[in-house]
Image: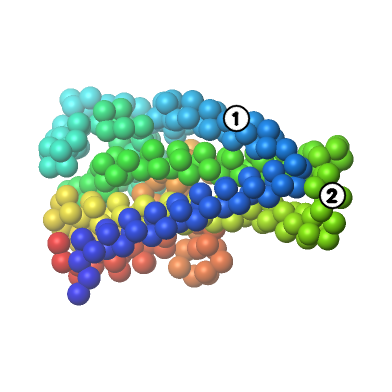
Amino acid sequence: MPTIYNQADSNISKTWLYMSFFFALVIAIGWFISYYYNSFLILVIAVLYSVISSFVAYWYSDKIVLSMSGAKQIEKKDNPELYRLVENLAITAGLPAPKVYVLNEAQPNAFATGRDPRHSAIAVTTGLLQRLDKAELEGVIAHEFSHIGNRDALLQTIVVVLAGVIAMITNLFFRISFFGRGFSSNRNEKGGLGSLMAVISIVLIILAPLLATLIKLAISRKREFLADASGALLTRYPEGLARALEKIASDPNPLRTANTSTAHLYISSPFREKQGKNWFVNLFSTHPPIEQRIKALVGMKV
C-alpha cells in the first residue's frame, strides 16, 4: 500500500528528473546557438542578464506577490484561532512562524511566499476561513508550510531563471537572424554538416520555449503533490486536506485578483480550469487535477 513517505520520495525524485532535463535543454540550446552563430559571447550575455534579473526579483518576490494579490497582514488579535493554528504548525514543522495575511476574496484559496523560512508569509482568503472546518483549514495551512519548508520559492526561482535563459537566447537568435547575417560563417565553412547543424539548431530553438514551459509546469505540479504529502505528515490527518480540496474545487466563485504570474502559488488554480477532463488542458496547467490529489491522499498510511 502506498504511504505518504514513498509518495513524497517519488515526487522529489521526479522533480529532480525534470530539473536535470531542464539543465540539459539549456546547455543544448546554448551549444547549438553558439555553433550556429560561431559566437559564445551571445550566450554569455543572455545567461548573465536572465540570471541577474531573476535573482534580483527573487529578493522582493514576497512583497510583489502580496501586493498584487491585495493581501492584508493581520495580527493575532484580528483572528486568534487562525494565528494559533499557524503558530502550532510552525512548532510542529520546526520553522519560524510566518506572517499571516488575509485576502478579501469569496473563493476559498491560499498561498505561501517568501525567499526562505525566516522571510515567509502565508495568505488565506476570507472564503477559505468561512467554508472550512478546523481540520480542513489545518490541512491547507500545513500544505503551505510544506512549500516553505521544501524551499519551493527557491526552486521555482531556479526554474524561472532557466526558462528565462531559454526565452532570452531564443529571442536573441530570431532578432539577429532577422536583422543581421554576420554570424553564420560555420554553415559556409563546414559545408553539408554545417547546414545540417543549422537546421537542427533552428528546429530546437523553435521548440525550446514550448519544452521549457512544459517542464516548468510539470515541476510546479510535482511540487503540489509533494506539498500535499508533506502537509499530511505535519497534521497526521490526510483526510482533512482531502476534504478541503473537495470544497475548494467545488466552489464557483472567481478570484478577482487572479494573475497568470502568481497562479502557480495558490493551493488550487484560481482560474478553475476543467482539470481532469482533458489531458491537453492538464498538460498546460499549473496544478495537477484535484481528483488526482484527493486520490493520492485518501487511504494513505501516515
Q: Would residue 130 appear left or right of 277 to someone viewing this image?
A: left
Q: Could you tell me residue 167's position as x and y percent?
A: 63, 43
Q: At x 12% / y 42%, what residue is drawn?
A: 92
Outermost residue, bottom side: 1
What residue is drawn where x is 53% and y is 28%? 52
Residue drawn at the location 85% of the way across and 38% of the way down: 182
Q: Dot 2 surroundings within 10 Å: few (below 14), some, or many (20 or more)?
A: few
Residue 114 rendering spot, x and y as whole percentages: 35, 32
Residue at the disc numbered 2: 189
| Residue 196 seen in this snapshot | yes
* Residue plotted at (30% across, 36% down): 122
Identify the residue position indicated by label 1 in the image.
Answer: 49
Disc 2 on helix, strand or loop? helix
Q: Residue 173 placed where, x, y %?
A: 74, 42
Three-letter amino acid code of the residue under disc 1:
Tyr
Query: Taking the image as drawn, is residue 252 in sight?
Result: no
Q: Nearer the viewer, residue 16 or 284?
A: 16
| Of the pair 49 and 243, the residue shown nearer to us | 49
Q: Nearer the viewer, mark 2 or mark 1?
A: 2
Mark 2 to mark 1 CA distance (whole Å) = 31 Å
Quarter of the rendering containing residue 48: top right
Position of residue 122 relative to residue 2, above or below, is above
Q: Quadrant of the C terminus?
A: bottom left
Left or right, 203 with respect to 3, comes to right
Q: Earlier in the sequence, mark 2 or mark 1?
A: 1
- Quarter placement of the N terminus: bottom left
